[in-house]
Image: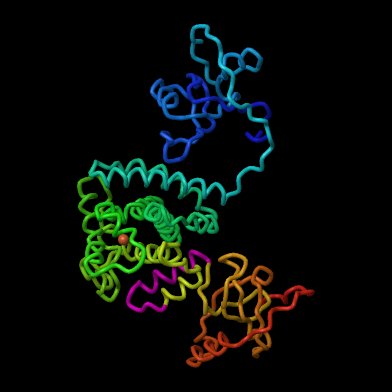
């Protein structure tokens, strides 16, 4: 039976009512003050009990998995023998619960909701770790490993969940959210490239730590709205080296994580920093990081710029010749399942069209159709909602239309198209 199907099972009590043997189902305080990594747990440690008494206003306990308040245990004849409750404390007036939760049936969370909740916990973990780094204290990357595992699991079967995680945008928490988003995107791309589980984990941790050096650059420069002066830019550009030095002090850190930290701003044409590496001098992990880092940065809201849409971002990144490894960028586009603006695609109805604007979601843009595949002839241009006539694959413009493709593409994109009429017939069968 699912947790949600049970009734009279959860009660909310004050934090100072927490007793050993209770099963903590939820801790009610802002995530930044939540002293626990785990979402729910059996309260067996006196230290944890003291922590809840001191710093948590309220908790929800699960009566099916642990003991209740004394007064409730007497009223409730159900056995709570898993686990055996600890000895009862000396008789004292049992306090009343603060709020009894009225049992309600809730739908189980969707995969997207679970992924978003995982990302929020990961952001909290990164925030704490970076705060330690800012204070110059020793950092414990081991704290991030459970988050990497959780994100890997949450995003393993569902590309949409991967995107959902990276759409949690809040300009005030930019560096932390960006770190988790880059880690998540890197795990997705590493998996898409066929890397094994261990490499996928390394990619996730590398992404979460890649910008840790920013903790040693003054926050007013890192968060400055608007253009940076030459001096400020020079300071920002120190962050890969600063981060690398911080991570060098840690034992047992995979060398690829250090490399990503130092080289995620290198460009294929040698114009990046700090070392001006070129082409394959840049490691595979650092090339992977560069694509994920820039994509997340340009799709984020900052105080000085709007967020680019995923389509816009990918279309622009394709134009920045010399910046990214082209094969890595193509793999990233395929991994996200998002076609950039200007991309030629085939629709389920066997028409070719060009992605021209946002649709209902990042994976269902509006496509301007103009060519019928079975008849091998052009059609009047029509804007098609791909939520109703899905994209079945990306196509190569040069293959279909030869060297004249860029001109044809520009002409079609400039035309005003008739919006697609409501479809009263089923799409034609695929060839
Ligand atoms: Fe960076």
In the image, residue 238 sits, relative to residue 378, either above or below, namely above
Which image quadrant is residue 427 in? Answer: bottom right
In the image, residue 133 sits, relative to residue 54, either above or below, namely below
Q: Nearer the viewer, residue 286 or 306?
A: 306
Q: Nearer the viewer, residue 122 or 147?
A: 122
- Provide residue 26's location: percent of width, then percent of height: 53, 33
- Provide residue 367's location: percent of width, then percent of height: 61, 77
Q: Which residues are magenta?
A: 319-337
**Can the viewer see residue 196?**
no
Residue 237 horizontal side relative to residue 77, left or right:
left
Q: Residue at x 68, y 29 (%)?
A: 7
- Provide residue 224's location: percent of width, then percent of height: 33, 61
Image quadrant occupied by the N terminus = top right
Q: Nearer the viewer, residue 180 or 158?
A: 180
The chosen color scheme is rainbow
Which image quadrant is residue 138 in? Answer: top left
Q: Nearer the viewer, residue 193 or 295?
A: 295
């Amino acid at each position: 039976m699912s947790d949600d199907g049970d009734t009279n099972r959860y009660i909310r009590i004050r934090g100072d009512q927490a007793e050993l043997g209770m099963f903590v189902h939820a801790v009610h305080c802002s995530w930044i003050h939540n002293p626990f990594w785990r979402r729910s747990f059996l309260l067996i440690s006196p230290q944890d009990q003291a922590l809840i008494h001191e710093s948590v206003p309220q908790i929800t306990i699960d009566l099916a998995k642990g003991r209740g308040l004394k007064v409730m245990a007497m009223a409730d004849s159900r056995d709570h023998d898993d686990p055996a409750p600890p000895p009862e404390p000396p008789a004292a007036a049992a306090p009343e619960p603060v709020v009894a939760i009225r049992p309600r049936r809730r739908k189980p969370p969707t995969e997207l909701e679970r992924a978003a909740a995982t990302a929020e916990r990961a952001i909290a973990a990164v925030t704490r770790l970076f705060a330690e780094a800012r204070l110059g204290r020793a950092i414990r990357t081991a704290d991030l490993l459970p988050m990497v595992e959780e994100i890997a699991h949450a995003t393993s079967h569902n590309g949409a969940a991967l995107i959902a995680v990276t759409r949690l945008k809040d300009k005030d928490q930019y560096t932390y959210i960006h770190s988790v988003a880059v880690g998540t995107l890197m795990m997705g791309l590493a998996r898409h490239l066929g890397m094994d589980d261990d490499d996928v984990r390394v990619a996730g941790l590398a992404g979460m730590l890649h910008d840790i050096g920013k903790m040693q650059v003054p926050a007013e420069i890192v968060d400055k709205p608007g253009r940076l002066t030459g001096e400020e830019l020079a300071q920002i550009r120190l962050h890969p080296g600063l981060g690398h030095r911080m991570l060098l002090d840690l034992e047992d850190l995979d060398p690829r994580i250090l490399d990503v930290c130092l080289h995620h701003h290198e460009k294929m044409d040698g114009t990046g920093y700090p070392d001006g590496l070129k082409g394959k001098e840049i490691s595979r992990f650092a090339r992977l990081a560069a694509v994920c880092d820039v994509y997340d940065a340009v799709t984020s809201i900052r105080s000085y710029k709007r967020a680019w849409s995923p389509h816009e971002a990918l279309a622009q990144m394709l134009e920045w010749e010399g910046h990214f490894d082209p094969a890595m960028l193509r793999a990233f586009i395929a991994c996200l399942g998002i076609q950039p603006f200007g991309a030629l695609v085939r629709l389920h109805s066997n028409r070719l069209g060009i992605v021209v604007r946002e649709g209902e979601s990042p994976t269902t843009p509006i496509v301007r159709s103009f060519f019928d595949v079975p008849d091998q002839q052009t059609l009047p241009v029509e804007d098609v909602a791909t939520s109703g006539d899905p994209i079945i694959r990306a196509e190569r413009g040069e293959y279909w239309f030869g060297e004249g493709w860029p001109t044809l593409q520009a002409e079609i994109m400039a035309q005003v198209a008739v919006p697609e009429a409501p479809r009263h017939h089923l799409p034609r069968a695929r060839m």
